Image (cartoon, coloured by chain):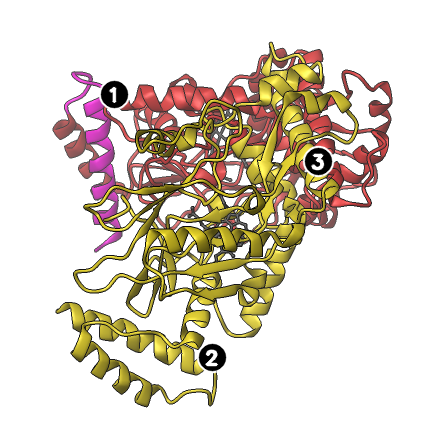
Chain colours: A yellow, B red
Amino acid sequence: ESEQARLLKAAETFVRDYAREHAGAVDPDARLREIADEVAAKGTYAHTPEELTYGAQVAWRNSARCIGRLYWNNLMVRDLRHLAHPDDIARECFEHLRLATNGGRIRPVISVFAPDAPGRPAARILGEQLVRYADDPRSAERRARAQELGWKGGEEPFEVLPLLIQATPESDPEFYELPEDAVLEVPLTHPHRPDFAALGLRWYAVPAVADMTLEIGGISYPAAPFNGWYMGTEIGSRNLADADRYDQLPAVAQLFGLDASDERTLWRDRALVELNLAVLHSFARVGVTIADHHTESTRFLAHIERENRHGRAVPTDWTWIVPPLSGAATAVFHRYYDPPDPLARPAFLYRPTPWA
Amino acid sequence: ESEQARLLKAAETFVRDYAREHAGAVDPDARLREIADEVAAKGTYAHTPEELTYGAQVAWRNSARCIGRLYWNNLMVRDLRHLAHPDDIARECFEHLRLATNGGRIRPVISVFAPDAPGRPAARILGEQLVRYADDPRSAERRARAQELGWKGGEEPFEVLPLLIQATPESDPEFYELPEDAVLEVPLTHPHRPDFAALGLRWYAVPAVADMTLEIGGISYPAAPFNGWYMGTEIGSRNLADADRYDQLPAVAQLFGLDASDERTLWRDRALVELNLAVLHSFARVGVTIADHHTESTRFLAHIERENRHGRAVPTDWTWIVPPLSGAATAVFHRYYDPPDPLARPAFLYRPTPWA
Ligand code: HEM
Ligand code: HEM
C-alpha cells in the first residue's frame, strides 16, 4: 500500500465522520474528490479550518487517558498552520499560554502549527510541556540540552525552562526563554498551616502538553501543544510527591509532625492529603482554575452519559482515569469502560523520539 | 473434543508442570498413564496429596489480582476431599477459621472438599466469604436466603451470617451458624480519638473466599475456601467506605469535624486516612495480623523479583494490585506487569452462579 493510498484512506474515514457529525454542512464525496486531486498533485492535502477544529476536538474526545473530556467541544483551536519557523512557533506558544491562562480562568486551547509533509517533517517542540521546571528530575534531558545550547539558568528551584524548538532533524534546536507574563505560577500555601509556605513549593497554572503528535485524517501535526486545567492530584499526588519527581512527602510529613518511621502510621497517605489540599487551596486563593479529583470524576461520568446518548462509545483507560489519590472514593473507580482503541483517529499520539 | 480428552489434556499440562518444578520426585509419563487408566475407568481421576498441595499453591501463585502472593508456597492445604456432606463441610469450615485465625497470627489456609465428578457436581458454599455480616449490602442475597431457610438473626449491626451450603442443584441449602470461637472480630478504635469507638464499627479477622472454584489439572473443586490475612485498605477503603457497602465516610468526617459541604476540602480523602488508620491500629492492638498497603506493595515487588529469578512470569492485573488508597504512593503503581492469562491453570475461577 502506497503512502498516498494510506493517506486517502485515512482522509476518507475522517471526512465521512466529519460529515456524519455535521449533517448537511458538507458533501463528503465532493470533498473527497477534492482531497484526492490535491493528494495526487502535492502528495498531501490541507484541512479546512472547520475540519481542523473538529479534528482537534475529536482527538481530545478520543483520548482514552483523559478524565477531562466533558468539555471536548469547547476546545479553542488556534489555526497556525502557516507557521513553521521556530521563532514564530515560540512566539505563538507564549501567546497560547497567555490565552489559556486568561487571568486565571484557564481555557482549554490547542495551537496547531505546520504539519509534516511528504519528505519534509515539520518543526518539533522538544520537552513534555510548554512550561516545565529545571529542577524537576523528569526534565533533566531538556535542562541539559538547554544548557548545552547556552542557556544560563538552572540553579534556582522551580526555574522555568526555556522552550526548545527544532526546525529539522539535522538542525540544532533553538531555545527561547518564556516571558514572565506568559507563565502564571502559584506559590503553595496551606489553609491551616502558615508554615507550609516555608517549604517553598510552587507550581505553574497551565499544563500544556507539547510533545504529542496530533493526527487528523492521515495528516500529522507534530507541533500542536494543547492544555486543559489541572486536576489537583497531578500536582499534589504525582509531580510534587513521586519519589522520582519532587519527592516532597518526607518534608510535608516532617512539617506536620507525622511519624515516618513506620508505614502503619499512614504518614504517606496523610502527607498526600495535606499536599493535595495545599494545591487546591493555593490555586483557589489566587483565582486559578483547578479541579479536584472527586468533581472531575463525576464530570467524566456525565461525559460518558452524554456521549452514549449521542450513540458514541467512550474508549477509556481505567488505569489513567482513576485518580492516584483515594481511587476507590471516586465515582470512576467502580465500573468498566469501553476499551481504549489504539487505532481511533483523530488522536494525540506519542512519539518514541521527536523525529520518529 | 470429548470431556475425557479435555480432562487428559489438562492433566498432562499439570503433571508435567508439577514434575518440572519437583525434579526427580515423579515420573510424569508413568503418572500420566496411571491417570489415563483411571479416567478411562471412572471418567475422572484423583490427585495425589502432593499434587493437591502444589496445585492449590500454584492457583494462588497464578492469581493475577492478588498482591499477597509472596507467600504462595506457605499455603496450608487441608485435604478434605473425602467430605461432601454439608454438615461435614460446615464443621470443617469452622475448623478452617480456627486454624487460620491461630490466636491472631493469621495463617493462609485452604480447605479442599470433594471435587465435581462427571454428572455429579459437588456441594457449593453459597456467599462470597465464610464470614460476612448480615447488614453488609453486599450480602443482601445471602441474608435473604438464610432468613427464608429459617435463620432468625439479621437485626443487629455486624451480625455474622450463617454459612449456606448446598449439596446439589436440586436441594435447598442448609444453614449453619458460625460458632463464636470460630470468628475473631476486631472492634475499631482510633489511636488519637477515643470517641471513634462510638461509631460502633468492627470487622472480622479472616477474609476467607468461599465461592471460587479451584481448578487443578482439569478437576474442579467448587468447595475450596481459602484465606490470607487482610490488607488494611480492603476494610478501610472498601468494605467500610464504599457508598454501596457500609458508607462510613460521612460519619467519620463528622466525627473529625471535617467540612463535607465541599469536595475541595478533601474530606473524603481525610476521612479515608482516619478510617484506614483505625483499622491498622485496631488489628495491631488486639494482635491480629494485618498488612498496610505500602508494605504489601513492597512485598509484591519482592515476589516478582523472586519469581523472575526462577524464570517464571508473574501475570498481574494492575487495576486490582494497585491499592484503592494513595495509589501512586505505593511501589506497585509505577510499572507495567506481565498480562493476566485467563487460561493459566491451576487457578481460582469465578462462577456466574453457584452451579454454572
Ligand atoms: C479541561 C481540563 C482537563 C483536565 C482536568 C484533564 C485531565 C487529565 C488528566 C488528569 C490526565 C492524566 C495525566 C497524567 O496522569 O499524566 C489527562 C491526560 C490526557 N489528556 Fe486531559 N485534561 C484536560 C484537558 C485536555 C485537553 C484540552 C486535551 C487535548 C486537547 C487533553 C488530552 C489529554 C491527553 C492526550 C492525555 C494523555 C496524555 C498522555 O498519554 O501522557 N486533555 N488529562
Ligand atoms: C497472605 C495474605 C494475602 C493478602 C495480603 C492478599 C491480598 C489480596 C488483595 C488485597 C486482593 C484484592 C481483594 C479485593 O480487592 O477484593 C486479593 C485478591 C485475591 N487473592 Fe489474595 N491475599 C492474600 C492471600 C491469598 C491466598 C492465600 C489466596 C489463595 C490461596 C489468595 C488468592 C486471591 C485471589 C484468587 C484473589 C482475587 C479475588 C477475586 O477475583 O475476587 N490470596 N488478595
Question: Does ligand 1 reach within 8 Å of label 2's beta carbon?
Answer: no
Confirm whether the magenta stretch covers residue B6.
yes
Task: Give whichever of A55, B298 is nearer the camera.
Answer: A55
Q: What chain does badge 3 belong to?
A: B
- Residue A17 in the image: above or below residue A208: below
- Provide residue A332's location: percent of width, then percent of height: 59, 50
Residue pictured at 60% horizontal, 12% vertical: A262
Q: What chain does badge 2 belong to?
A: A
Q: Quadrant of residue B182?
A: top right
| First to last magenta residue range | B1-27
In the displayed structure, does residue A300 sit left or right of residue A160? right
In the displayed structure, does residue A253 sit left or right of residue B49? right
Q: Which residue is mark 2?
A: A21
Q: Residues within 10 Å of mark 3 (few under 14, many from 20)?
A: many
> Is residue B137 among what the camera can see?
yes
- Provide residue B73's location: percent of width, then percent of height: 38, 19
- Residue A25 in the image: above or below residue A255: below
Q: In the rendering, which numbered label is found on residue A36?
A: none
Kindly report the secondary structure that dominates the magenta region of the rendered protein: helix
- Provide residue A169's location: percent of width, then percent of height: 21, 47
Amino acid at circle 1: His
In this rendering, do the residues under marks 3 and 1 share a single chain? yes
Q: Quadrant of residue A46?
A: bottom left
Residue pictured at 40% horizontal, 57% vertical: A224
Q: In the rendering, which numbered label is found on residue B240?
A: 3
> Is residue B162 among what the camera can see?
no
Q: Which residue is mark 1?
A: B310
- CA–CA distance in space, label 3 to label 2: 45 Å
- CA–CA distance in space, label 1 to label 2: 55 Å
Q: Residues within 10 Å of mark 1 (few under 14, many from 20)?
A: few
